[in-house]
Amino acid sequence: MSDILKKIVDKRRQRLAEARAKQTYTEPSRSANIQSAGNNPFLGALNDKRGSAVIAEIKMGSPSLGTLADRMEPLKLARLYKEHGAAALSVVVEPDFFHGSYELLAVCHEASGLPAIAKDFIVDPLQLHWAKRAGASAILLMACLYSPEELLQYARLARQHGLVPLIETHDLSDIGKLGNEIWELVGVNNRNLRTFEVELSTSLALLHSLPTGALKVAESGIHSASDLGMLRSAGYDAYLIGEALVTADDPAAKLNELCGG
């Protein structure tokens, strides 16, 4: 784990410990689960636009970009995503390094009407409760943060909350943690979280190592229709796009381009 990733995770653990001390949390019934794409809005939306499904992201900043609050109106952007063809919404909710919140997720989900995924560094089941309460229907689980057993446990807990887990990988070590389980969504993050460098070729190199039954999501580094077209031709089903949209001078035009006009 890189120094920056360790700092983020350690800070999340600190904040979650403080929240645990103030909030009562009851885990959902173990009988609750996702049975099919038909009863999960996020999965259903990606299936409906399979091959060209753009998951458009709202993030208020990042360690590499700093804060974006002075150049972004998140509710306006959320509505724009809906109007210009996004299949689903991603909201980065980590507060200290990415300047997000679950409240931001709730208002952006309501403003857009799009099914939403909460992007956080999940270290406590309480975060799953917050995501569900904020209106998310999916959650990001970064494989690099967990042992295979922990990853499976968090995925099962997510499903019990009615959240489909998107399992994020970056290398063969991450993919090896998936084992022979059935996964709904598996992504490849082209951003190396150790160096924060982005290589679009990462998605191409790992594609055929991903579970065959999962919807496959390429994440990060997608800046043009040609990038998306290359990934589609290779076999990806959906594309999580953040910086290309939140830093664009005209996000609507950029999203139109990425969604094929």
Image: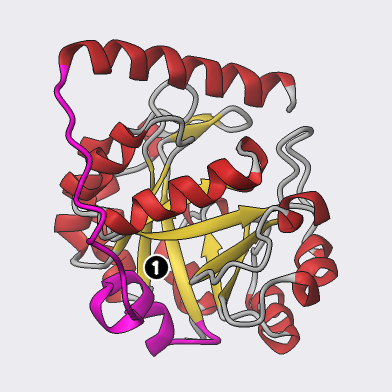
- The residues colored magenta run 23-52
Q: Does residue 117 appear anywhere in the picture?
A: no
**Left or right for 180, reference 17:** right
Identify the residue at image location x=27%, y=45%.
131
Of 142 and 241, nearer the camera is 142
Q: Position of residue 251 (x, y in %)?
A: 43, 61
How many numbered tags mark residues here?
A: 1
Q: Position of residue 50 (x, y in %)?
A: 49, 87
Of 52 and 82, nearer the camera is 52
Identify the residue at image location x=63%, y=31%.
64
Question: Which structural element holds mark 1?
Answer: helix
The residue wearing badge 1 is 252
Identify the residue at image location x=34%, y=80%.
36
Q: Does residue 113 belong to the magenta stretch?
A: no
Residue 222 falls in image quadrant: bottom right
Q: Does residue 34 belong to the magenta stretch?
A: yes
